[in-house]
Amino acid sequence: MLAVDKPNDKGDQINVMWPPVKEKIRIDFLQIFQKNKSKENLLIENLADKISGKEKDDNILYYDLFRKNLGTGKMEYINRFQSFITNYRDQRQSFKDTKNKLEGYKKMLREQPTYKYYIRAISPLYYSKVTESKPAKMQGQWFNMEKIIALIAMMVITASLFYFIRKAKSDASLYIRPLAGLKEIDNAVGRATEMGRPILFVPGLSSIADIATIAGLNILAGVAKKAAEYDTPLFVPLRDYVVLPIAQEIVKSAYSEVGRPDAYKEQSVFFVSPSQFAYVAGVAGLMAREKPATNFFMGMFWAESLILTEKGNEEGCIQIAGSDAETQLPFFITTCDFTLIGEELYAASAYISKDPLLVGSIKAQDLDKLFIIGCIILGTLLTTLAELLTYPALNFFKMLFPVQ
Amino acid sequence: MKTTIPLIIVLVGGIIGIIFQFIPHEFVQTINDEILNYFRVLSFFALPLGIVSILMVHTGKIRRKAQHWQYSIILILTIFFMIVTGFVFGTDRFDPRLANYGWNTIFMFMFQQVQIPIESTMFSLLAFYISTAAYRAFRARSKEATILLVASLIVMLGQVSVGQMIPIIGDYIPVISNWIMSNPNMAAKRGILLGVALGMLGTSLKIILGIERAYLGRA
């Protein structure tokens, strides 16, 4: 029987394993005791002598698992397990659940629970001998070794980011592939200006904690600047009230930057509703009343994406969408004139601002992608060869990337 | 100063966030949870800004007598009605007057009997919009659209029992449908996800390092 601290955890679990007992239990002894007046155990009968042949063998039905806290000496019954189960993950109560967290943490440190586990197999008639484990201590780790590859990857990506940013500072002619959707932003804003109709910008329905929302807001900064330049009304309806002051500040700054702070209307960036479909109803109503010439949908979207874009279609708007929600992309591609797919949403800010630092970061991302594609091809080749040549050692590369 | 302090907060917060991702120890994870709890509490303070924003937009519309301004009156009245009923009667307190109807408070009555049906109605529009979008997507205007049309027809037929009843090819349709879903479709999906993951990581690093600062209102 084995009891070991669960690796890479916060220190509240122990893995307990016991060998499967497939063979029948041999009943070697079965004795009945009785306490006498002076509380001594007296052997009344030794049944093992009376059991012979078949009766001594029996099938295992269950295992009973116990644990003993070596700190307090308290013995606890954990559970009864079916005979095919041979492992259990024991977990203690988190100190977070205690009323006073600091006291709870101090108590946890004081006790540092060390447990010893006991198991016995049970047949219909008899218990087997009790097997015990070596003591195991619940210990929290200060580094999750399972994430070592993620850490290395992050360091490589950060290093490439710094390299290309340095390069971009000295060489401003870094080329990045043009994206149709972003090239059309100027035309879309121009179209709204010519038609004398407003622009609608939806920075997704997610919260500010979502990177896609921040990416959407970065694009809003560029669009708002162009709208301010052309004096085209801009509407930014929002679902999240935390995003509201941020979006207002972005649009306000954009108007100030082009020297038109007076043209900014605070009510053009407004909160609609935190409820998904109430928000959709509000934005659809806005489209019906204000008849925007151009719609931007940039950020995270769910089921509402198609309702919003189909309404835009009905109103004859030019629509540019960008999202990292792969389930909504088909709807955007079908109903919008231009769509930024996945990572293009994150690259948009660099395209719009033309800031060499941001452009350099896009180059770094491309290099990282190339590296990952190389890893995928190498991994596929090595794993295939390992199968074909029946040479498992070639699987080492695949083992470097455990699926969690 | 207006930009520097937020950038320092983002840098410190971002680095702490990254470090916490690699330390599973209970002590650190508890601090992490507490920080996230504070974020939730702090974000609640932005709610009045949202309410003020709604009120400003709609009172402005009423004042200007803008198109459909009458709806703005209903909206404002409803906001106050829900706030008052929520505060006065509670959001989950049992109300014996409504017990016979299986409802508890006026607030919950409004939520369950008004808001949820309206939201369901909005959601049901999706079915019709999917039909019109599908019609537009499946018109075989180009080579790519034709491939899309054929693939989608096979996948659709593979999902329903009618597909297997087609003579001769019926048995192959579910097999081809599964192949389309688990090979070209999955490959494309993973390609997008790979790019998205890198994009998110790149954007996060740019924000933490202060390279990307458009979200601060400095485009």
Image (cartoon, coloured by chain):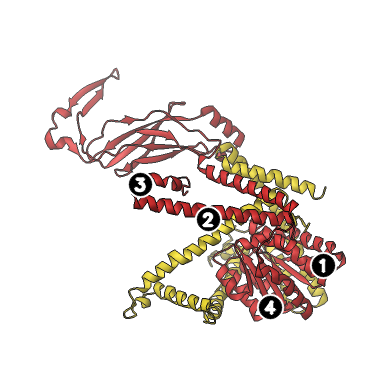
Is residue A333 visible to the viewer in this orientation of the structure?
yes
Q: Which mark is residue A317?
A: 4
Q: Are marks 1 and 3 on the same chain?
A: yes
Other-residue count near label 1 (Cα within 10 Å), few / some / many at <14 / 14–19 / ≥20: some
Other-residue count near label 2 (Cα within 10 Å), few / some / many at <14 / 14–19 / ≥20: some
- Residue under mark 2: which chain is it in? A
- Do the residues bearing badges 3 and 2 touch, measured as CB atoms within 8 Å? no
- Residue under mark 3: which chain is it in? A
Kindly report the distance in space between the C-alpha atoms of the residues bearing marks 4 and 2. 38 Å
Q: Check the rendered structure and report the hue given to chain B.
A: yellow
Check disc 1 and give the amino acid type.
Answer: Lys
Other-residue count near label 3 (Cα within 10 Å), few / some / many at <14 / 14–19 / ≥20: few
Is residue B110 visible to the viewer in this orientation of the structure?
no
Q: Which mark is residue A373?
A: 2
> In the shown orientation, is residue A186 left or right of residue B190?
right
- Could you say whether the residue bearing mark 2 is in a helix, strand or loop? helix
In the image, B101 versus A2, the foreground residue is A2
Other-residue count near label 4 (Cα within 10 Å), few / some / many at <14 / 14–19 / ≥20: many
In the image, B77 versus A366, the foreground residue is A366
Q: Residue B218, image x and y in percent?
A: 78, 57
Kindly report the distance in space between the C-alpha atoms of the residues bearing marks 3 and 2. 24 Å
Q: Check the rendered structure and report the hue given to chain A.
A: red
